[in-house]
Image (tube, helix red, strand yellow):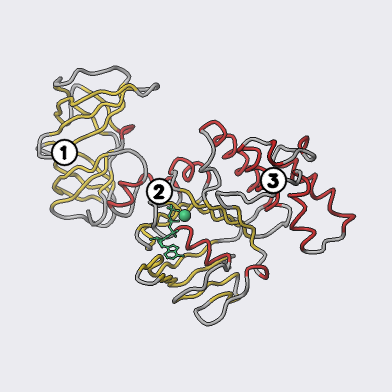
Amino acid sequence: MSEIRVESLVKQYGDTTALDGVSLAFPPGSFTALLGPSGCGKTTMLRLIAGFEAPSEGRVFFGDRLVADPKRQLPPEARNVGVVFQSYALWPHMDVAENVCYPLRARQVASADIPARVAAVLDIVGLGDFAQRRIDELSGGQRQRVALARCLVAEARIILFDEPLANLDMHLRSAMVDAFRDIHRRTGATIVYVTHDQAEALALADRVAVMSGGRLLQAAAPQEIYRSPADAAVAGFVGRGSLISGNTVHNSGSTSTIDVAGHRVAARSLGEPTGAVKILLRPEALRIATDGLPATVLDSVYRGAVHEVRLALSGPGQQLLVDSTEALATGERVHVAVSDAWVVPGA
Ligand SMILES: Nc1ncnc2c1ncn2[C@@H]1O[C@H](COP(=O)(O)OP(=O)(O)OP(=O)(O)O)[C@@H](O)[C@H]1O
Ligand SMILES: [Mg+2]
């Protein structure tokens, strides 16, 4: 049985439809990243699961228990859900331990049990030595860890994160990504993690749910979202790559032969595509070679590990991104060998 299930969820704010019929189940212990552009309904989804908002239509279940429909909602405090938002709402004048033990005092946990539980969660987030430090004497990353500890101390089965790393710099973010992975492993909690950072989503989650305009576009393992996006919107939103026009020549099982400007490309496909299609080409599946798609170099940008080369294929607006170990000169004519491609459904 799923830990959380949302069914045909709709949330209307006046004329704005923030959620437009989303159905999704979250298995126990799963780590789902909700990914999508600003305004697509990610925070709204968390607020409905936590119980801060009522659905306009549809239902929310925890296990087989109905916790919300448009008529009745279980209040947030009765749902035992941990929530960590982007602004971590700590009490600046209290020290770290006082902030972290607050949910336990509010729930009237026996005071003899509190110090050990606080110490244990501070250890998990790497703040064991900071218990007596005031919040306003901590860095942004340390404050975020306190918010995390305060959420963990309640031992909720379900934890919701809304862009918890948005305020941190790149180095802290990657350290915190490791901390989240560790916390998930230790607690086994069911986690829903909102982000618009796709690298974070792909690195952390066992499943990525991509949303747009209040709708769910695709929910699948990170590798599948990346390799086999369900439509052009997911392909465009997740990872670098190019959508190239071609024509179906032949299908054989789950592989199609696609003609791109007179050259044959083997592409993975769903069903049996016919006629004009769009194929997704990721930079790492392309290589400058002596044979393959003919192209002209538009520009070459140094990215540290590689040069990202933008190429023009024949045909209007047809551009490719290729990672190359060497810089290439604008105007140079090259060929591109393709080792993997995906026929994007419906594109
Ligand atoms: N309380 C509210 N009243 C009116 N409209 C709202 C309210 N909350 C959200 N909305 C609207 O609902 C839509 C979805 O908002 P939501 O906050 O869920 O987006 P989001 O995906 O979390 O975006 P972001 O990445 O920018 O945080 C937006 O168009 C937003 O303006
Ligand atoms: Mg949001």
Give me the C-alpha separation between circle 3 and circle 1.
54 Å
Q: CA distance from mark 1 to mark 2?
A: 25 Å
Direction from residue 90 to residue 56 in the image, left or right: left
Quadrant location of the N terminus?
Answer: bottom right
Image x and y of residue 53, in percent? 53, 69
- Marked residue nearer the N-terminal end (2 or 3): 3
Q: Is residue 339 above or below residue 198?
A: above
Q: Amino acid at mark 1?
A: Gln
Q: Which residue is label 1 attached to?
A: 318
Q: Residues within 10 Å of mark 3 (few under 14, many from 20)?
A: some
Mark 2: is the Cβ under 8 angstroms from ligand 1?
Answer: no
Q: Position of residue 19 (x, y in %)?
A: 41, 66
Q: Is residue 5 above or below residue 177?
A: below
Residue 233 point in image, percent of width and height: 30, 52
The residue positioned 34% from the left and 47% from the top of the image is: 237
Amino acid on which disc 2 is placed:
Glu
Circles 1, 2 touching at the beta carbon (< 8 Å): no
Q: Mark 2, residues whose alpha carbon is within 10 Å: few (<14), some, or many (≥20)? A: some
Q: Secondary structure at mark 2?
A: helix
Q: Which mark is residue 224?
A: 2
Amino acid on which the number 3 mark rests in the picture: Pro
- Quick one: SS at disc 3? loop
Q: Front-most of 225 and 173?
A: 173
Q: Earlier in the sequence, mark 1 or mark 2?
A: 2
Residue at (14% x, 26% y) in the render = 296
In the image as oriented, which residue stretches furthest toward the front? 93
| Tag 3 residue | 92
Q: Which mark is residue 127?
A: none
